[in-house]
Image (cartoon, helix red, strand yellow):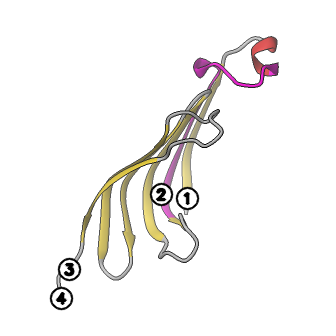
Amino acid sequence: GRIPKVALALSATRAEFAAPTLPKQAIGVAIHFEQAQVTYMQGHAPLTHASGVVNVDGESLTVEVGSAKTLSGTQAQDGVVTIPDLNADNPRINVTFSARAPAR
């Protein structure tokens, strides 16, 4: 895969960075990716040719996948993975996407 663009913004006091959790606005990261291969769960087929962006702030993570391939001929698109609270002991992970596959 390729990472053509990364953006980072930091805005917090020393005390905020030393705290156990960061305020939402303390950090902002955007990582754009292209042609990536992602193994999202052991034992499952990986996503290949994935393109999109990962956004992280002090509280949450969002991955937007514009397109990817998996299995034999399956095209995934408009995927969104969110972890709304990175500080939770057992964080909820939300996944949505559309898929097209040939019928045989």
Q: Residue at x 71, y 25 (%)?
A: 21
In primary-sequence order, the first of circles 1 and 2 is 1
The amino acid beneath tag 4 is Arg
Q: Are marks 3 and 1 in contact (CB under 8 Å)?
A: no
Which quadrant would residue 74 be assigned to in this image?
A: bottom left
Residue underneath mark 1:
2
Which quarter of the rendering shows the N terminus? bottom right
Question: In the rendered structure, are the residues bearing label 4 and label 3 in contact, judged by CB atoms less than 8 Å apart?
Answer: yes
Judged from the image, the secondary structure of the residue bearing numbered disc 4 is loop
CA gap, disc 4 to disc 2? 30 Å
Identify which amino acid the numbered label 3 is placed on. Answer: Pro
User: What residue span does the magenta drawing correspond to?
Assistant: 18-36
Of 65 and 92, nearer the camera is 92
Q: CA distance from mark 3 to mark 2?
A: 24 Å
Marks 4,1: beta carbons within 8 A = no
Q: Residues within 10 Å of mark 3 (few under 14, many from 20)?
A: few
- Residue 94 lies, in percent from the top left, at 43, 46
Q: Residue at x 55, y 67 (%)?
A: 41
The residue beneath circle 2 is: 34
User: Reading the chain from its start, which is encountered first: label 4 or label 1?
Assistant: 1
Q: Is tag 3's residue or tag 2's residue first in the polypeptide sequence?
A: 2
Give the label on residue 104, or none: 4
Q: Report if residue 85 lies within the magenta region.
A: no
Per the rendering, the mark at residue 81 is none
Give x and y (percent) for residue 32: 50, 46
Viewer-nearest of discs 4 and 1: 4
**Residue behind mark 3:** 102
Determine whether the residue tagged by mark 3 lies in a helix, strand or loop. loop
Residue 84 in percent (x, y) is at 50, 34
